[in-house]
Image: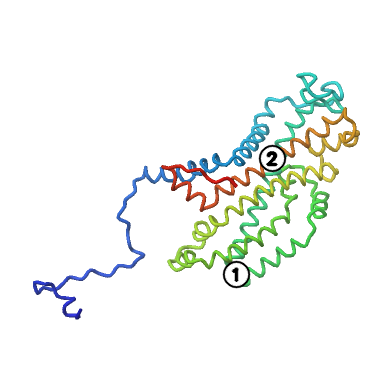
Amino acid sequence: MKRSESNTATDGGSIAREPAQSPFETVSEIEITRSERYRALVNEYVITPAHILWDDWRARVGFLITLSFLLIGTVGVLLVEETYAGHGDTLVAPFQTMAHPLGTDGLGRDILSQLVHATPAMLEMMAAGAIFSTVMAVFWGVTAGYKGGSVDQTMMAVTDVLMTIPGLPLVVVLAAVIDPSSAWMIGVVLVVNAWAGFARALRSEVMKLRQESYVEASRTMGISLPAIVTKDILPNVMPLVVVNFVTTARNVIMMSVGLYFLGLLPNTGFNWGVMMNAAYGQGGVYLSSLFHWFYAPMVVIVTLSLGLLLLGQGLDRIFNPRIRARHMNTDDEPTSEPQH
């Protein structure tokens, strides 16, 4: 078509040209009301995660076990009386009396009461260690991976130094120097350099993500760095972050119980490791009359660790963008999710 024809209408008049519109100025013709927006947020952050959680038996079991320990640590301590030396007869066998359903130890202290009142401190240690380790690893890994260059080299040099320091001796030295009395402080000391390994792994993932087309488009559009990190980077690494959070919490349980058992952490109250240490000292490993004293805290530790492991697998599915999108698309026509 000639240029003169393209600018002339059939009646001989000229065609009015519309000003060219940038693709970034295009406005959607669909309007969403405020109630629809709220409904979409509830669907994305409440209903969809609940569907994913309930569709997986591992997530259900892990969630119920973890919730049970949270209730024991908050409500249970109010319902179960704190025990003391001479509370009952010594070494009462379990299931012999309702006053001491799990029996008593060598000092006449109720086993069930010790298990319940040791739970809050353990939950505090788990929360402190997992939060500290995850926040440090995410900040360090995402910053180094996204910035690159000299910032990356400097930050990774620090992580390499931390990773070369043996964790257990460092914790023992810090516990001797600081002498922590707070459960929150003990939780941080236990993972003081444990975040370095995950920070390096996270940095590798971020280096790949920053080359993706949608991240490049965000940078071209002039979107701020915090917005790119929170909306384009973090959602894609959340499964890794969640799994690391739960894994760190499990490691805090094992490390704290082990160090308390060995007597390397200050005794600040009831603790499952201290119970096992006291029972072991009286021959609880091989004397059947002491089995309830030694193995009751071990069963509790294994149960909590298993619950966190199963919950971590469920949270991995909740924060997986592909699985979330699949469940959001099937809200009207629910389909069964394949079990792995």
| Quarter of the picture holding the N terminus | bottom left
Please state the horizontal and vertical placement of residue 2, each as a whole percent of the image.
Answer: 19, 81
Q: Position of residue 4 (x, y in %)?
A: 16, 80
- Residue 133, horizontal then vertical, whole percent: 67, 53
Specify the farthest residue to the left. 11
Q: Residue at (58%, 45%) from the top-left corner?
A: 339
Label 2 crowding class (10 Å Cα cut-off): few <14, some 14-19, many 20+? many
Q: Earlier in the sequence, mark 1 or mark 2?
A: 2
Image quarter of residue 199: bottom right
Would you place residue 93 above or below residue 314 in this image? above
Q: Is residue 340 above or below residue 74?
A: below
Quick one: SS at disc 1? Answer: loop
At 85% from the left and 43% from the top, the residue drawn is: 263
Residue 67 percent coordinates (x, y): 62, 36
Instruction: Decide: few, some or many residues near mark 1? Use Cα within 10 Å; few <14, some 14-19, many ≥20.
Output: some
Give left or right: position of 106 versus 252.
right
Q: Which mark is residue 148?
A: 1
Residue lying at 13% horizontally and 72% vertically, measured from the top left: 9
Q: Quadrant of residue 77?
A: top right
Q: Which mark is residue 109?
A: none
Which residue has dot 2 on it? 123
Secondary-structure class at tag 2: helix
Q: In which image quadrant can residue 70 be found?
A: top right
Q: Is residue 28 left or right of residue 331?
A: left
Q: Amino acid at mark 1?
A: Gly
In the picture, measured across the screen, residue 277 lies left or right of residue 186, that is right
Tally the numbered discs.
2
What amino acid does circle 2 point to?
A: Leu
Q: CA distance from mark 1 to mark 2?
A: 37 Å
